[in-house]
Image (cartoon, helix red, strand yellow):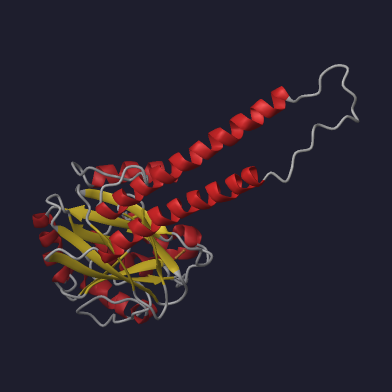
């Protein structure tokens, strides 16, 4: 129900952008996801073949050897065992099948891991936190959260390389239409890459249980045409918007302890524990995908994040109504 509301809202926000909101591994739109689908089809076909053989033999046996009228309950069927040929067959054939499956998987994994980056590649550092994603663009000095903007690779010559690590526990990056799961592990860097072929929003999520709000650690990859992506970069590179009308609200925000956890570039808010809010209003969701980023939701979120994301590390600041109004109006000026 909530997802439908969110989808409808998003459709209204990004008109004309083809959305790929169904996290479907069978509809890949990037190279790694595509090679994984091919491998998945082969594994499914082999498994389906085994299922058919086993199920047919089972049905045949049940029908052919059922007890018929007049047969004694004590009568045993003929006992056949010790046939070397049969035992060799049912040992060797499964081993061969398992080796085929291992070979197929290993080949796909190696092909994805060893792919050499194209000359035009974007580097992103993705850092897992309980329960949100920090997204850094080291070549541009940018930091954002929960939404990864990347250029689309319609010519197949662009790719985004992700360096994955974690600040706390193990998380896992998974955007089914773009690439399979890769873990984010503290004190270690893992790599994966994506080359989305169509512009749009690709949804993903954390795929490794990481605590209470694991299920609300959602991720969006927003693939944009080169020009749109560059426009986004240019906007994000700017320091926080200084709206003269929001100066009072800004001062009010600055006096609260929000600034100890959040960064707003160009202001006294230099915290690093929570998401960077410099361009908060450019994001589609709040709380790593739990709420659509509307004025009403923003107010509810700031008032008490525990309402929509119980257990998350942002506490309710117990703000008074006027304080809440000021904080929200300042945050809304952060375009
Ligand atoms: Cu992060 Cu599950």
Residue 50 visible: yes
Q: Nearer the viewer, residue 146 or 116?
A: 116
Residue 30 position in % (x across, y down)? 25, 51
Which residue is depicted at the point 15% across and 61% down?
232
On the picture, is 113 further left or further right than 310?
left
Residue extending farthest to the front is 84
Q: Nearer the viewer, residue 108 or 126?
A: 108
Residue 124 position in % (x across, y down)? 24, 69
Q: Nearer the viewer, residue 259 or 248?
A: 259
Residue 237 position in % (x across, y down)? 15, 71
Residue extending farthest to the left is 227
Residue 291, quarter of picture: bottom left
Residue 250, quarter of picture: bottom left
Which residue is depicted at the point 26% across and 83% down?
268
Ligand 1 occupies quarter: bottom left
On the picture, is 63 further left or further right than 185?
right
Residue 180 visible: no
Q: Nearer the viewer, residue 153 or 297?
A: 153
279 up-or-down from 65: above or below: below
289 up-or-down from 277: above or below: above
293 up-or-down from 78: above or below: below
Quadrant of the drawing holding the N terminus:
top left
Which residue is depicted at the point 33% across and 41% down?
8
Across the whole image, how many numbered discs are drawn on residues? 0
Quadrant of the drawing holding the C terminus:
bottom left
């Amino acid at each position: 129900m909530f997802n439908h509301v969110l989808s409808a809202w998003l459709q209204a926000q990004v008109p004309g952008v083809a959305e790929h909101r169904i996290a479907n591994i069978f509809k890949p739109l990037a190279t790694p996801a595509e090679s994984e689908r091919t491998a998945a089809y082969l594994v499914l076909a082999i498994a389906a073949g085994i299922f058919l053989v086993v199920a047919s033999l089972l049905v045949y046996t049940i029908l052919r050897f059922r007890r018929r009228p007049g047969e004694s309950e004590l009568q045993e069927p003929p006992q056949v065992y010790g046939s070397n040929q049969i035992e060799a067959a049912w040992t060797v054939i499964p081993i061969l099948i398992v080796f085929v499956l291992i070979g197929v998987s290993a080949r796909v994994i190696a092909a994805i891991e060893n792919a050499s980056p194209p000359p035009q590649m974007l580097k992103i550092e993705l850092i897992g936190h309980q329960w949100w994603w920090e997204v850094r663009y080291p070549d541009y000095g940018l930091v954002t959260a929960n939404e990864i903007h990347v250029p689309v690779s319609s010519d197949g010559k662009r790719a985004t390389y992700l360096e994955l690590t974690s600040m706390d526990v193990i998380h896992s990056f998974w955007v089914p239409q773009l690439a399979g799961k890769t873990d984010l592990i503290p004190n270690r860097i893992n790599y994966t890459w994506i080359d989305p072929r169509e512009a749009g929003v690709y949804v993903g999520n954390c795929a490794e249980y990481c605590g209470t709000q694991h299920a609300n650690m959602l991720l969006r990859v927003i693939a944009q045409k080169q020009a749109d992506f560059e426009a986004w970069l240019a906007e994000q590179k700017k320091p926080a918007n200084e709206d003269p009308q929001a100066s009072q609200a800004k001062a009010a925000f600055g006096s609260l302890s929000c600034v100890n956890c959040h960064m707003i570039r160009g202001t006294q808010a230099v915290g690093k524990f929570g998401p960077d809010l410099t361009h908060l209003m450019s994001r589609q969701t709040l709380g790593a995908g739990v709420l659509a980023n509307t004025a009403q939701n923003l107010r509810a979120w700031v008032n008490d994040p525990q309402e929509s994301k119980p257990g998350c590390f942002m506490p309710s600041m117990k703000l008074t109504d006027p304080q809440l109004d000021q904080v929200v109006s300042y945050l809304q000026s952060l375009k």
